Image (tube, rainbow, N blue to C red):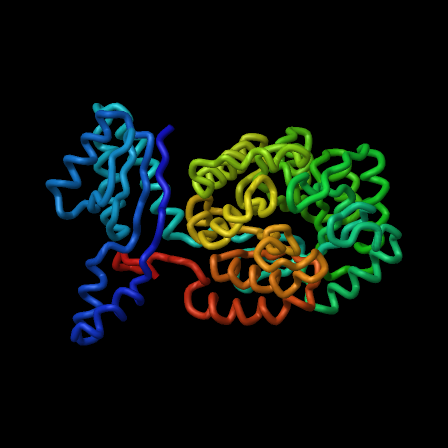
Amino acid sequence: MIRARFFSFDHPDDLRMALRPLGFPTAAASFVGSTLAQGHLLVSGLPPATAELVRATCARDETMPRLTAGDREGAFLLSGRLEQHKRLGTWLQQRPDVEGAFLTGGKMLRACFLAGERPPPVRIGSRVAGAGRTLIMGIVNVTPDSFSDGGRYQAPEAALAHARALVEAGADILDVGGESTRPRGPYGEGWTPISVEEERARVEPVIRLLAREIRDVPISVDTSRAAVAEAAIEAGAEMVNDVRGLADDALADVVRRHTHVAACVMHTPAEPDVMAERTDYEDVLGEVAEALEERVEAARARGVPPDRLLVDPGFGFGKTADQNLFLLRNLSLLGASVGRPILVGTSRKGFLGHVTGRPVHERDAATAASVVAAILGGAAVVRVHDVGACRDAVRLADAVARAENGGSFFVRGDGGWD
């Protein structure tokens, strides 16, 4: 399969600063910095004829990106400015006579477009994700076996009191879940499936109560079941948060019919009871990004437009601690590959315990740190248990990340990276 995604970005400000100690005046540093490689694009799966065309074109034409590494079975790392990557993509699309050239060019141009544009925002009730400040999603578990707060908020009145406390602390969205999906593995005790009827009985009265008593905060339902989502939406939910990525066509149809409802599709490689055994990724970032792209496209094919969808990398779901950390460190690249606002749920997860050695209820400081990292990587929504413990971290991260350009890499008019 032909793939193209940005592997890393060099920020132009960093390049210019590196030139100043060498004696370059400001204007000269800006000029030279703008000519250096700024975006590193990984293309793979190229047929032999296209691979040879890319190799020859980049070698003879200085207006094309540099071929800095390759090729292994039709894989290259191309380094250059955005305009150079676009030029090569356009050139390849003009060679339909070469097997795979047109498709490769299209993949490159799509990668350039996504890297250069802010993802369209998603409206969630009265809130908008991806249009400015980061939204905080507060977790309201109405389950007896959640890994963090199982059983504490099962009763509707207890859930209401907890939800009010989350809103008072700064929650923008309330996420109500009735089935624990804690994975089996070194950081989880396992998943106990429940019936549709039981899950609906847990979440429907709580959502109805929250929608009546807390009217200015949108409610999300954390479910993978169409019947539960339908009941939750009728009770007042305005978002479906699905750990299985709308894989159930019936659930996608529910979201399609309720055109005011947003949805989040999460990456998970398998069911919770076996996902700990499915961590053998060759390229975890590329494979998670590709899977999320496929889920967004599948939802679109079922009639759910992408502008109603967020994506979630699925931290803690079928990833090792190192893989979770790698995804968190490269979140901006994931966003540039998928092109949808990102929801991040790292709260009290096992990989934070792996790093800190802390048990579940002592991971709020680590959660806040992971939230900051996520926001600096472009996250639009962060999902947390203790909103108060993260609120100031979110505000500070927003002040750093959103001050000038939305906290991500966007294209200037001259084709450089901002």
Residue 377's place in the image compared with 43, above or below, is: below
Residue 260 visible to the viewer: no
Q: Position of residue 214 (x, y in %)?
A: 79, 60
Q: Position of residue 293 (x, y in %)?
A: 49, 38
Question: Farthest residue in the left direction?
Answer: 60
The foreground one among 4 and 114 is: 4
Q: Which quarter of the figure has residue 149?
A: bottom right
The foreground one among 312 and 229 is: 312
Instruction: Tell me the residue at 77%/60% (across/down).
Output: 215
Q: Position of residue 44 (x, y in %)?
A: 33, 34
Residue 221 vs residue 144: left or right?
A: left
Instruction: Tell me the residue at 21%/29% (across/down).
Output: 95
The C terminus lies in which quarter of the figure?
bottom left
Residue 159 visible to the viewer: yes
Residue 227 vs residue 342: left or right?
A: right
Instruction: Tell me the residue at 65%/40% (across/down).
Output: 185
